Every structure is written in structure tokens, then in C-alpha cells.
Amino acid sequence: MMLSASPTSIVKSSLEEMLESLRRQDEDEKPKDLPPALPSRPTSKARLPSARRSLPTNFRVDSNGESGGISTEVEWKEEGKRKEEELGVKRHVFGSRKMRKFVNVDSPYNLEAVEGKKGEDRVSDAKVEVNDNIGHFIKKKLRVWCRLSNGLWGSGTIQSASGEESFVSLSNGKVVKVSTNELLPANPEILEGVNDLIQLSYLNEPSVLQNLKYRYSRDMIYSKAGLVLIAVNPYKDVQIYGEEFVTSYRQKATDIPHVFATADTAYNEMMNDQVSQSIIISGESGAGKTETAKMAMRYLAVLGGGNGRIGRKILETHCILEAFGNAKTSKNDNSSRFGKLTEIHFTEMGKISGAEIQTFLLEKSRVVQLAAGERSYHIFYQLCAGAPPTLREKLNLKMASEYNYLIQSDSLVINGVDDAKKFQKLVEALDIVQMCKEEQEQAFAMIAAVLWLGNISFQSIGNEHYVEASADEALTSAARLMGCTPNELNQALSTHRVQAGKDSFAKKLTLQQAIDSRDALAKFIYASLFDWLVEQINKSLGVHKKYIGRSISILDIYGFESFKKNSFEQFCINYANERLQQHFNRHLFKLEQEEYGLDGIDWTKVDFGDNQECLDLFEKKPLGIFSLLDEESNFPNSTDFTLANKLKQHLHSSSYFKGDRGRAFGVRHFAGEVLYDTNGFLEKNRDSLNSELVQLLSSCNSQLPRLFARKRINRSLKPTISSDTPKQSVGTNFKGQLFKLMHQLENTKPHFIRCIKPNCKQLPDTYEEELVLQQLRYCGILEVVKISRAGYPTRMTHLEFAERYGFLLLETNASQDPLSISVAVLKQFNVLPDMYRVGYTKLYLRTGQIGALEDRRKQVLQGVIQVQKYFRGHRARRLFHELNKGAKTIQSFVCGENIRRKYAIEANRCSSFASHLLDEQLASVIYLQSVIRGWLARRDFNNMHNLKQLNRESVKSRRKVGRKISEAKDMPHEQQIQVVPSVMAELQRKVLKAEAILGQKEQENATLREQLQQYEARWLEYEAKMKSMEDMWQKQMASLQTSLATARKSLAADSNAGQRRGDVVSPRYYDSEDNVSMGSRTPVGNMPDVVGGRENGSLNAVGNLLKEFEQRRQTFDDDAKSLAEIRMAQPTSNVNPDDEFRRLKRRFETWKKEYKLRLKETKARLHKRGYESDKTRRKWWEKLGSRS
């Protein structure tokens, strides 16, 4: 039968056009666009709808989609028969006794016999259709998949077909002969590399493999398989985790599958639905689970607080736990040897408030025993390579190649990994989680102690087989780091105390017993240290944690493992993976399909690989593997052989158990059969530790060993469930942890991420199809896609759907029950009948249908918000204006009252001090007048004195010249010297020359006189300007004095204070004009005492200016006179009067500018004093006017 889509399929393949002729007859008979009939009660175990959510009376949906009466059971059965005829099988609702097996319709050439007469007819018709379809594929040259001789799938086109054989031309040109039944249709090229496998037209193994390979070759390592995210490990750095990708997924700008998208979905559902979420990451060892968990946690840290402090702490825990809990195995260079559940708590605002880490079953045996090509935990190598010199000396550290525990394997380094740099990052991470340096050194001391314990050797004593520890560097260093003496450590490792009644005695140990005791101590110290580190991290992460019921849990647990030799650790790891696979099956297969049946949805069951029987093999009591293991562990004489024989004896009937020779047994897991070696099973399950070693740790000086011993003692003292119940073993304890984990995950909504390992050699760009296909099979990816494609992933109760989308109805629905509203909404938005189903209690929609409703709801809500925004804005503005108007009215009254009060206070103050201020101003005016008048008198006196001096000097000089001339004339003739004519001629020439020089000098003197006259004219101008300024000052002072006198008289008349006027002003304080004309200077000492310090400063400045003016004027006059005398003196003088006069002029100009500036400043100061007095007087007059 040719593969065709189910009538309820959501994906319409483009290849269906080829089959149109084959389905035309059936489609003509099928009604068009019929809404789904409301479910009546099927003959199954489905429950009836509850009374609270019962269907409306006489409700039905007719062909037009309108509500009417309820469809009868007969109509529902007729519809069911019609679908049975279309499918060619009997239809049964899930939950009934007869369950139809899922028909594998991947191959269009697969022929199956169908029971019944109609089935036989259908088979005969199918044979005809097969022949026609093969011809169609040959004619259209459509691609098909065929299995090659090497087991791989090849793509090609059918050249010819004859009976059960077909000839296929492969893409490389080779033609192969294959069975027709093994041919599978290939998808068109347009569907290569789709994001979601649901979008594939033909869902089969080679199509899924090809789609993943196509995306993997283009570094698109993430794909969707319905509700599951598939992550293929690229084994290289892929640039898809930058900040731009984080922003893109936060803003919903892309829908490409990514771990960020899964984390974003979990975060949004947690915030919207108020339900805790979980992200479960699974896969084989080396598939990239740890890195995927890192990326998911990094994205959540950005969503929940950016790169805040708590978010950074959570991210740095990866570095710490990887160093102490990860190791190199033969399949993975960074394999997690423990399980981890990180529960991140969020506040109501979506911010990270804290976190908690739970760990499961650390592989302790790796500390003391290594397989070839593997390494112990990373911390040992990082400490040896990166410890600073001070720490190295303190711990007596050597190179990694010098410790016996590390050299069991020849793999001491990992290619491309620098252990020294890793150690530096580890120290930084410990600092970030706020672990102090002292605690870090204690932890590193325990690591070094474990390394030195491995180097302790034993030597025989006496002739017997008993041994004791050699007293060498290893014993001394280990004892010092643990905080005990070498002798105490030697006694604890080489002896065992046996209790005999009330007495006890020490028994020496053999070499193997001593080595086991040493290894047990090393394993215990390391495991206890790991648990202590997790406790310290949880304390740091839980400081600000507030539990409000919102959390996202990320599970990163060890993957399924199968080595050449599998021991107890692999047994527990694979059991954990079986339990996780059951959780996966439960949520994606069982609960999904059960819900359809319980709610009355017509559904064809999809078969899947259920591993419940394998889990029963492990957990069943009393004949499960764990029960038998615990029973054998409690027998003192039991061995690994007896355990293997007991397992084979009691479990041989199970199809999932396989007995093998010797100590081995096999288990058929969901991921394949694994052979286990029971060697060491009992010892590891008991996890025993000698009491001497516990006592040794309790007596150590170091803090951590004592803490480890105290916890061990407390666990051993805990009461068991019953008195006859033995101490809980490692296996039983681990099973209990898994049960608790499953219970915790059941309370969350899961999001699954399946990590795929593309090759076993950890090489980039290498895709091994058989390995990938094997992982896809046991993960159930194909079944998940089938359920997702045929199912209804979006489901809401009728009430929830009506409350969320009911307001989108354009017309009011007459019936207000939730079911009617829901159907009306679907009808309004033209949702096709095949796209949804109506159940008893819920409405089921296919993928993508809810998006249109959400978009429309978002648009309507945005419009409503806009209307509300404008209305609230208008109302707020109106209220604001009213409040503003009232506030201004109140403010005006308050301000008026305040001003009136201030005015009253100011009026009282002015009336009290007005007379005092007037007296001060009047005294200042009088003092200023006295100073100015004194300066004028002194200036006139100096001018007159200088003029008289000049007159006297000029008279004296004329008298001297006349006296010399008269003396020369009165000289007797006899005394005159007789000269010869030649001498006379020489004298005449000299006289002429002197006259010429004299004439030249007279011209120069005339020029100098002109210049002097110009300077004198300028000086007169300056004097005139100064005189005018003085007159202006006198007029201003007189006006001010008159105003003050008038104000004083008015004040005296108003306040009846005539007596005070005589007390304040006395005539003896005024300088008369007679005194000024006589040139007398008004003494400062005669000023009244009422003048304040404020006026004294201004008057002193005026006096200083007057003094400076007099001094400078006297100086310039003296200099000018001396220059005039020099010019009139003998011309042989070295002094040039013109140059000196120019210098004098420059000095005078410089001083004049400075003096003018200071004079303006003084005048401004005096003017300000006058303005303040005038302002006070106006206020006083205004007050006086208001009183009147």
C-alpha cells in the first residue's frame, strides 16, 4: 500500500500530488470541512465528564460549525466506521482490551495481510496500487532510499522493477538490485535540512539520518523532533553561542532550534503558568551533555539577572565540579563521573534568587584504579601542574608522573588542555563562590594526601605474611597533611582490631588487606571532600534564596556506558539511564496517549520500546538484581562468584538477563546489551571502612579529616527501618536517590534534550550513520516524531480556553458555557476541523494552531492597552489640573499671609532703627564733606606756594645774569688781554660757530617750549576736569545733606523727638566755609562717635587717595621744575631734557590711569552708600504714607 497521510495528519506533503488519482475516489466520498463530532462515551475505560464541567444540554456541531444538539452514539459509530474504511483497519480507542498495533507505513511497498473479507479486498487493491506507484516513481524519476550491502542507506532512482526485485541507480552512478519491500520514499530536496523532523513528508530512518547529516555538515547541530531537542556534538568550537544569539532568542527574533530556545521556553512557561520546569539532558558518554547544560544555565543566568553575582556563581560551579568530578575515559576526554541536578530558584519578578546542587554516585574507584588510556580526576593533574611555589612547598608536591595512583595509565595529559591554566581558573572560581583561602588550602591538602597515600608501600615483618608501612617520604607526607603522626597512620593501615567478647586485640594485615585498607582510606577522603565541596557551594548559592515554588532544574547525569570491562560503576550508571528513559517514555508516550483515551479522543496507538521489564529486573523484590546483590553482600563468606551464580540461578527466565561464563552476566538495556564483570561488586556495594581508619581521622589535627569522620559516624548511628534491616548498601542508596530524583522531576514540566555522538573517535565533521541511527533508535526519536505529528501538543480545558480567547468573539454568543464559546472562537478564526479535537474536558489543537490565536489576542490586548492608556492619561491630566489649581489657590493665600507677616516684622524693625540709621548716614556725609573741603584747601594752598617759589627763582636768575654783565662792563681796559689778529680770527670763528649752535639750541628750546605749552594746556584741561568733578561731588554731597536734613526733620516731627535731634547732631561737628577758605584741615578726631566701622573704611580710602594725589602732584611738579632748570642750564649736560620729559610724561599717564580707576571704585562705593540710605529713606516714607 502506498504511504499516504492520515485524514488527521497536519502535514500536507508535496508528493501527494502523485497519488491524487489513487485517492480521488475516497476523497469524493468523504464529506468536506466537517467539524469533529463531539465525543460520546466509547466502549473503553475512558471516564465520563465531571459534573462541574458537563457538556451543555442538546449540544452538537453541525456541518456548518454551529452549535446544536448532541451527536448520538449511532452517528459517532457511523463516523467511526467511515474512518475504519478509509484506514483499512479496525479502530479501537486506547485503553480497550483490543489494541491495534501500529502499522509501519514508512515503506509504500510493504504488504500486510489484514483480517476479514474487506481486508483481503484491500490487499488485492494494494497490489495493483503498488505496481502503479512504482511506475509513477520510475516515470517521474523520484528519489528513494534502499539499504546497501554494507548495511547503510543509499539514495537513488528506480530504473526498473520486476516482481519483488527492483534496480536502483544510486547517486554515484552505480546500479544495485534490492528488494522492493525494502525501498523507502525519499523527501524532495526542498525539505532537506528542515528545522523540525515533523516537517518531513516521509518519516523514516534514512530521511531522519540524512536531515541530521545535512544540518551537521553546516554546523547546525541542533534539530527538533517534536517536543525533543536533538543536539549533535560537533567536537569543535561552533560560533552559535555569542551575545548576539542570546539577544536574538530573548527577543524571539528567530525560531531556529537551539538550547537557548529550549531554556527560553522553560523560563517563559515557568513565569506564565507558575509551574516549575525541568530540562533533562541525556545521551551517551561523550555526546556533549555537560556543555549543553552549561549553555542552558548560561542563558538562564542572563534571563534571571544578566551577569549578576548569583548568576556568575552558578556558572562558576561548573569549573569546580568538573575539576573534582570529571575525568578522561576511553570515550570522552571530559566525562562526568557523577550525576548532577542543578535547581535554580527565581523570584516573582523572574530574577535568580538562589540555587541548589544535588549529586549522585561519584565514581570513587577511579581514585585508586585506572584503565589503560584513562585518567583520574582532573584536579590531581591540575594541582601538580599549576600549584604556585609556596603551595607546592607546603604540600610537598611532585610531578604527576611520580604518584602511583596516576601512573597506572600512560595518559597523563590531554591533547589541547593546559592543566596549569585550568588550575588558575579553578582558583578564580573558588574565589567567586566565596571560599576562603584557608578552606582552599585545606582542600588541596586533602588532594595531596590522597596522592601520597597511593605512594605508601608495605614491607613484610618476620617470617609471616603480615606487613607494615614503610617509613619513607610518602608515609611522612601523608601523615603530615592529614594531621596525624606517621606511626598512627602506619598502625591504622597495617592492623585491624578484632572484638572478642568484651576484649579486643589488634590483628596484623596481609599485603593485599593493607593495600585495600589504604585504597579505602583514599577513596573515602576523596568522596568526602567532594561532598564537602558541594555543601560549601550550596551555602554560597543559597544565601539569598527564597523558595516561592518557581524553579528550573537542569539534570546532567552520566550517559549510557559500555566498555570492554564493565564493573559496578557502569552497572549503576546504566541503571540510572534506564530510569531516565522510563521517565522519557512516560511523559512522551504513555501519559500522552493515555490522556487522549481518557478524554474520548479518537486515537491510534503508537507502539514504542517500553523498558519497564528491564527496570523490574533491577528493582523487583525479592528477586531483583539489587535485592540479590544486597543479600549476597550481607553474607560474610560470599564472593563475586557466588553472586554471579545466584543471579544466573534466579534471573535466567528473564528475557532481559543473560548468564555468561564465570563471573560475568549480561543485561539487555534499552540502548543495547552490556556484559558486566562481578569482580569487585560486593566490596564496592558494601563500601566498608575499617573502624581503625575512622578513629584515625577523628584524632587528626586537621579540620577536614575530623569532619569527614564525624559524618561517617553519624550515618552509621542512624536507626534503620527495622531492627533486622542491615545497613543500607551503595546500590540501595543509589536506587533511593534515583527514586527521589524521579519524584522531584514528576512535579515539574519536563523539556528533553537528546545529545547524539556522531562518531566514536571524537573527530569534528565526521558522521557515522550507523552509530547515529543506533542512538536515535533507542532514544525513540522516530516514535516521538510520529506522536508529535499525529497528536495534539496544545491542550487546554474548555474553561481556560474560553477565559483566554473568549473576548475575541465579534458577536456575543447566546450560550455562555465554555464549550460553546470555545467552538465559536475556533469557527471565527477558520480553524480547520482536522486541526483540533474536542474532548470531555479539554480542547486539543495541533502544532501551530494556537499561534494565530495568540497573535490575535496580543493585538487586541495591545489595542485595549492603548485605549486604556489614553483614557487614563486624560483622567490623570484632568485630575492634575484640578489639583494644580487648588494648590495654587492655597499657595496664594499662604504666600500672602507670609508676606504680610514679614512686612509687619520689617515695619517694626525699620521704625525702631530709622533714627539710628539716619544719624549714621548724616555723620558719614559730614565726614565726607570735611575730607573733600580739606583736600580742596590744601590743593589751593600748595598751588599758591609753588607759584611764589617759581617767581622768586626767576627773579634771582635774572639778577645773577645782570650782575655778570655789569661786572664784565666795569672791568678796566688795562686788564683786558691783548690778542693778535690770528687769535682774534680764531675767536670769531668760534663765536660764529657758537652762535650757530646757539641758534640751533634756541630752535630746540622753542620746540621744547611749544611742547611744554602743550603739556601745560593738557594739565589745565585735567585740572578743569578735576574741578568739575569736585564741583559735582560737592553738589551731590549738598543734595544728600539736604535730603538727610529734611528726612530728619520729618522724623523728628512725626515721633515728637525734638530732644533727640539736639542729642544726635551738634553744630561743632560741621566745618564752616571760613575754615575751608583759610586752608585749615578738618581733623578726623572731631568726628562723632556714631560713625560705624563700615563708614570708616570708605573714609579712610578717600583720605588715602587725597594724600596720594598731593604727594604725586608735588613729585611731578618738582620733576618738571628740575627739567626746566636743566634745559636752561649749560648745553654740555649729559642729560637730555626731552627724553626725561617723555619719561616723566609716561610715568604721569600710568599713574593717572591707576588713580582714575581707584577713584572710580571709591566713587562707586560712596554712591552705593548713598543709594542704600536713599532706599531706606524711601521705605521710611512709604511706611509713613501707609500710616497716614
Image (cartoon, helix red, strand yellow):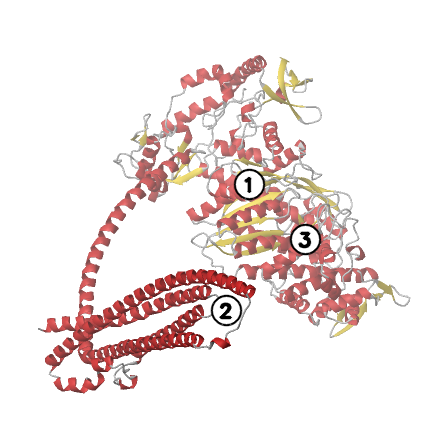
Place of residue 757 in the rendered image (x, y in percent of width and height, measured from the top left): 65, 39
| Secondary structure category for the residue under label 1 | helix
> Distance between the Cα atoms at labels 1 and 3?
39 Å
Q: Where, quadrant-wise, is the N terminus in this rendering? A: top right
Q: Name the residue under label 3.
A: 422
Q: Which of marks 1 and 3 is nearer the N terminus?
A: 3
Give the secondary structure at mark 3.
Answer: helix
Check if mark 1's residue and mark 3's residue have beta carbons within 8 Å: no
Question: Circle 2 sits on which residue?
Answer: 1133
Would residue 628 appear left or right of 1160 to someone viewing this image? Answer: right
Within-10-Å neighbours for mark 2: few <14, some 14–19, many 20+: few
Of badges 1 and 3, the one in the foreground is 3
Q: What residue type is labelled 2?
A: Ser
Amino acid found under the numbered disc labelled 3: Lys
Name the front one of labels 3 and 2: 2
Q: Is residue 151 visible?
A: yes
Image coordinates of residue 612 in percent, x first then y, are 59, 42
Q: On the image, numbered disc 1 is attached to which residue?
A: 585
**Mark 1: few, some, or many residues within 10 Å (few <14, many ≥20)?**
many
Q: Relative to the observer, which residue lies in front, 1009 or 376?
A: 1009
Q: Earlier in the sequence, mark 3 or mark 2?
A: 3
Q: Residue 889, relative to residue 750: is it above or below?
A: below
Residue 284, numbered label:
none
Looking at numbered disc 1 in the image, what kind of residue is underneath it?
Asn
